[in-house]
Image (cartoon, helix red, strand yellow):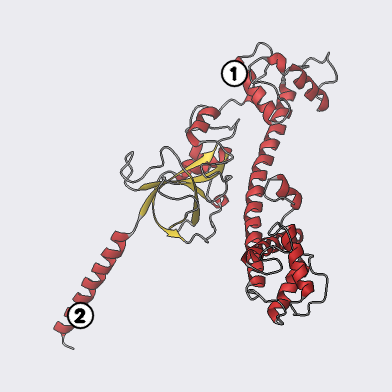
């Protein structure tokens, strides 16, 4: 090969490569990705001036627009992205769209060049530090399969103290003594905290007289005072404030833990439901519609299923005789598929009967899986409204 041919080949290669790379990279999609978090009362820092203002900016902190509880890997997206859409942000894991936001807009709205996403960064001061450190980023992305699980763990994202260095520390409610002469704002805030902690069930009206006895009983229970003649009785003095602060943050920590636990149980229960449905489908796959006096493995499989559901207490003979027929009739009557043994379809394994057996098999298998799965607790599942035992 002479030098001219070699030069021509090299030139052609670079032309082709440039054309290909230009096509690929020009087709790359980008998001403008910002961050938000769930504010908690009595944080040390707020981006806005207080908890209420911060909550208006970031939203409530238990459930978001889709109705799902908050979880690591959740993002807010514009309305044209369906809830449950999985998004892979290049180099930054898979996230799950479950929220909206008035400022979460499409490209060329509100000054954004690309569609905007908002990634959730956790609770309280830690979440605020992460959100501020994250800032605003432009990130390549693509839609992942709906079966893909979220892979991001917010604990792996830094929450540096320098992110809040420019913010002014807040004065906590638990640093202020509250009494009859205190401001309505401080008394209302105390009432709200006591209500969250299930210590107060009255109205939030700023009237300290409504919580005086509650404070007194709390002081006695916690052994802060010995009686009504103690100097700090009925008054949120230093020891009472310190104890309230500890108990309140224990409550918040428990609340966050419960939300995380609930999310885990919801995901695990969904997996168990899928497993039970697959098992029921497999068991029913080769039964079809056996006929009266048929002798086959299909009949035997049907007898085994009826036995699992406590409707067949005999040897599985593989013969579709009167015993098997009467077992099906008993099942159909109890499930209200038929009302009498002379009804059309009585004793036949027709689609409506098969569908009912499939449903009952799924329920049975799910109950067995829940009972034998060491990672879930039936009491917790019932408590969170995930499962009816």
Q: Is residue 341 visible?
A: yes
**Left or right: 226 in relation to 71:** right
For numbered disc 1, what is the local secondary structure?
A: helix
Q: Residue at x 76, y 76 (%)?
A: 321
Residue wearing tag 1: 185
**Left or right: 250 in relation to 94:** right
For numbered disc 2, what is the local secondary structure?
A: helix
Q: Closer to the observer: label 2 or label 1? A: 1
Q: CA distance from mark 2 to mark 1?
A: 79 Å
Residue wearing tag 2: 9
Q: Residue furthest front?
A: 342
**Left or right: 135 in relation to 277:** left
- Residue 241, given in percent of the width and then of the height, sits at 70, 25
Question: In the rendered image of this protein, does residue 50 appear above or below residue 293?
Answer: above
Quadrant assignment, res 3: bottom left
Question: In the rendered image of this protein, does residue 290 appear above or below residue 355?
Answer: below
In depth, the one of 344 and 248 nearer the eye is: 344
Q: Residue at x 70, y 31 (%)?
A: 197
Q: Residue at x 66, y 27 (%)?
A: 193
Label 2 crowd (10 A; few <14 / some 14-19 / many >=20): few
In depth, the one of 324 and 138 nearer the eye is: 324
Q: Quadrant of the N terminus?
A: bottom left
Label 1 crowd (10 A; few <14 / some 14-19 / many >=20): few
- Residue 122, given in percent of the width and then of the height, sits at 56, 44
- Residue 184, given in percent of the width and then of the height, sits at 61, 15
């Amino acid at each position: 090969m002479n030098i001219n041919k070699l030069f021509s080949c090299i030139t052609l290669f670079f032309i082709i490569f440039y054309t290909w790379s230009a096509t690929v990279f020009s087709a790359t999609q980008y998001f403008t990705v910002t961050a938000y978090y769930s504010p908690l009362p009595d944080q040390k820092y707020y981006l806005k001036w207080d908890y209420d203002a911060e909550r208006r900016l970031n939203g409530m902190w238990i459930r978001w627009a889709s109705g799902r509880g908050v979880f690591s890997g959740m993002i807010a997206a514009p309305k044209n992205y369906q809830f449950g859409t999985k998004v892979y942000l290049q180099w930054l894991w898979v996230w799950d769209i479950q929220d909206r936001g008035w400022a979460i807009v499409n490209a060329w709205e509100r000054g954004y060049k690309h569609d905007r996403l908002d990634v959730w960064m956790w609770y309280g001061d830690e979440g605020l530090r992460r959100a501020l450190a994250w800032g605003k980023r432009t990130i390549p992305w693509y839609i992942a399969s709906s079966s893909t699980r979220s892979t991001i763990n917010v604990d792996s994202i830094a929450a540096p103290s320098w992110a809040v260095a420019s913010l002014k520390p807040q004065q906590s409610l638990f640093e202020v003594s509250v009494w009859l002469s205190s401001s309505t704002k401080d008394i209302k805030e105390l009432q709200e905290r006591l209500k969250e902690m299930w210590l107060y069930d009255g109205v939030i009206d700023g009237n300290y007289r409504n919580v005086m006895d509650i404070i007194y009983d709390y002081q006695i229970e916690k052994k802060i005072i010995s009686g009504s003649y103690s100097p700090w009785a009925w008054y949120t003095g230093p020891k009472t404030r310190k104890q309230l602060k500890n108990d309140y943050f224990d409550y918040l920590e428990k609340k966050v833990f419960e939300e995380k636990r609930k999310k885990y149980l919801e995901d695990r229960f969904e997996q168990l439901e899928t497993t039970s449905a697959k098992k029921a489908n497999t068991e029913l796959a080769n039964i079809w519609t056996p006929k009266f006096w048929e002798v086959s493995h299909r009949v035997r499989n049907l007898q085994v299923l009826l036995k699992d559901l406590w409707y067949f207490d005999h040897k599985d003979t593989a013969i579709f005789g009167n015993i098997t027929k009467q077992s099906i009739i008993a099942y159909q009557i109890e499930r209200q598929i038929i009302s009498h043994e002379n009804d059309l379809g009585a004793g036949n394994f027709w689609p409506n009967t098969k569908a009912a057996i499939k449903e009952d098999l799924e329920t049975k298998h799910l109950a067995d899986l829940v009972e034998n799965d060491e990672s879930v607790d039936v009491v917790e599942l019932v408590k969170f409204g995930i499962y009816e035992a």
